[in-house]
Each structure stands twice: as C-alpha cells, then as structure tokens.
Image (cartoon, grey):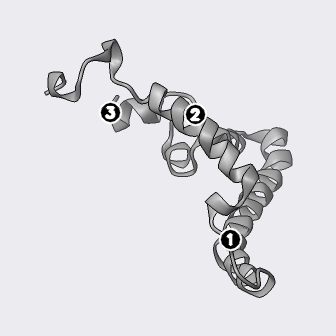
C-alpha cells in the first residue's frame, strides 16, 4: 500500500505510522476531532503522548544506572540457577520444533 493510500485510510496517517499501534490511532483520532470533542480530548492525547515519551526516556537512561547501583556481587550464570536451567530445558526443544522449515525439508530446498 502506498503512502498516499495509507494517508487516506482512517487511522493510517503519518502520526499513526510514527507512533504505531493503538496509541497512534488514539492520538490521530483525537487530533482530528473538532468541536467539543476536540477540546476535551486534545489535552488527554498530548498528556498520554508526553507520559509515554517520559517513560521511554526513563527506561533508557535511569533503569541501567539503577541496575549498576542495586545489583551487586557475583552474578551467577544461567546454568547455575535451577529454575532458569529447567525453563531452558523445556524451551529449547519447543523452539527447535517451531523453527523447523515447513514440510520437514532441509534448508537447501528453500533456495
């Protein structure tokens, strides 16, 4: 679908492609609204957008800094932890089964 077609689709404008998901549809619907609805939902849409941007900035900057402060001592490997080891033992065969090519053919048939 071309950019021109996406712009004509309800909820398919540039704001939706930039923000993605439900948030983009919510924001563009609130920005496009006029009259009383627009006056009511404009502050809500921008507050939600600013809150999501602030949380993303905190997750990128503050969380790694706090991890270095609060996580002290020797970090054990995954295989030393019995809970994680049992999850890996279950997860690995399931992942191998799901990643098989369709029909059980080898990868040389895909070329």
Is residue 31 among what the camera can see? no
Spatial CA distance of label 1 from label 2 is: 47 Å
Mark 1 or mark 2: which is in front? 1
Residue 40 x %, y %: 86, 47
Residue 94 vertical placement versus 43 (above, below): above
User: Residue at left 55%, top 48%?
Assistant: 15
User: Residue at left 85%, top 41%?
Assistant: 36
Q: Is residue 6 left or right of residue 107?
A: right
Split into 4 quadrants, where in the image is the C terminus? top left
Q: Please, what secondary structure does the residue beneath circle 3 have? A: loop
Q: In this view, does 66 lie to the left or right of 97?
A: right
Spatial CA distance of label 3 from label 2 is: 15 Å
Q: Crowdedness of circle 2 by 10 Å Cα count: few (<14), some, many (20+)? A: some
Residue 77 x %, y %: 63, 67
Residue 76 is labelled as 1
Which comes sooner in the sequence, label 1 or label 3?
3
Residue 86 x %, y %: 69, 44
Q: Crowdedness of circle 3 by 10 Å Cα count: few (<14), some, many (20+)? A: few
Give the camera-side residue of 59 and 89: 89
Which comes sooner in the sequence, label 1 or label 2?
2
Is residue 16 among what the camera can see? yes
Mark 1 or mark 3: which is in front? 1
Give the camera-side residue of 53 and 110: 110
Q: Crowdedness of circle 1 by 10 Å Cα count: few (<14), some, many (20+)? A: few
Give the camera-side residue of 53 and 8: 53
Residue 11 is labelled as 2
Q: Please, what secondary structure does the residue beneath circle 2 have? A: loop
Q: Is residue 99 left or right of residue 49?
A: left
State the residue position of label 3.
2
Give the camera-side residue of 104 and 89: 89
């Amino acid at each position: 679908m071309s950019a021109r077609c996406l712009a004509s689709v309800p909820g398919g404008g540039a704001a939706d492609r930039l923000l993605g998901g439900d948030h983009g549809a919510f924001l563009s619907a609130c920005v496009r609204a006029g009259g009383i609805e627009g006056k009511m939902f404009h502050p809500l849409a921008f507050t939600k957008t600013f809150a999501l941007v602030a949380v993303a900035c905190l997750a990128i900057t503050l969380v790694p800094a706090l991890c270095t402060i609060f996580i002290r001592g020797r970090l054990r490997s995954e295989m030393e932890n019995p809970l994680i080891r049992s999850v890996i033992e279950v997860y690995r065969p399931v992942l191998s089964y799901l990643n098989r090519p369709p029909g059980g053919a080898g990868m040389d048939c895909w070329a």
